[in-house]
Image: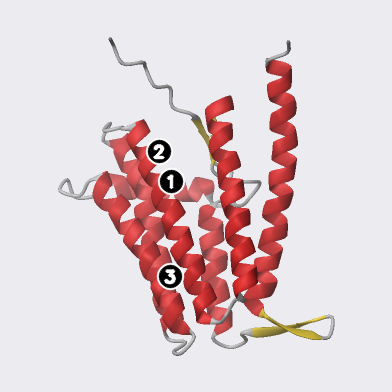
Amino acid sequence: MPEQVFRDAKRQLTGLLAQAESEALHWMARHTPTRVNSDHLTLLGFLAMIGAGLCYSLSGKESFYLHAVNVCLVLNWVGDSLDGTLARYRNRLRPRYGYYVDHIIDTIGTLVLVGGLAFSGYMSERVALFLLIAYYMLSINVYLTAYSLGTFKISFGTFSPTELRILLIMGNLFLLYKPKVSVFGQIYLLFDVGGTIGILGMVLILVVTTVINTVRLYRIERI
């Protein structure tokens, strides 16, 4: 029995730096040595994310590790963003394999990253837990949308994983000098404030996109 043809979901990337990032990645793909393939880059991105989580967990005792976190985040961007671009540039596409591996790695890597942040003491465990839950719920919504509507939305508005990495890097630099901030006269951890804003933003995006997708699917499949 012939294998059913797989139809890859259409990618949508509208981040603030999307155009510049695309140009940079295509330049990097053209200059990547032939002995380096997409699997190598995927592994680099995964190990870098694990490294970022481990360095976060050590940064509570030695803030120098926050610089190591930033280095790992840059390496994660290289591996996570360039692997697909390189595959498309060399016409070595494996859409099902790439989609599955990229996202299961992202799931594990995010767990380690946020877990390391919670262990560092720079973010409370409760905020870290709710941040992780909100991220996973939004990710599930993205994957369901890709399956049911054929559109894989990588960014929301002007924010994509690249912009989020940059914000995290900037936050790490602020941690070196001011790990706590005053909000309405109360002192909070800087990353608790940032994490709470992130949770509220992801929940809002989840609610809005859920309503939009549900209405769209209802209209497509009227009884």
Residue at position x 33%, y 36% in the image: 97
In the displayed structure image, the side of residue 3 where residue 13 appears, left or right: right
Q: Mark 3 points at which residue?
A: 53
Residue type highlighted by circle 2: Tyr
Mark on residue 99?
2
Ranked by sequence position, the earlier of labels 2 and 3 is 3
In the rendered image, the vertical position of residue 50 relative to residue 15, given as above or below:
below
Quarter occupied by the N terminus: top left
In the rendered image, the vertical position of residue 30 relative to residue 125, given as above or below:
above
Task: From the top left corner, tell me how far across and down residue 196 is, in percent.
Answer: 70, 66
Ranked by sequence position, the earlier of labels 3 and 1 is 3
Residue type highlighted by circle 1: His
Measure the alpha-carbon separation of dots 1 and 2: 6 Å
Q: Name the residue under label 1.
A: 103
Dot 3: within a 10 Å radius of its alpha carbon, few (fewer than 14), some, or many (20 or more) residues? many
State the SS at label 1: helix
Quarter occupied by the C terminus: top right
Residue type highlighted by circle 3: Gly
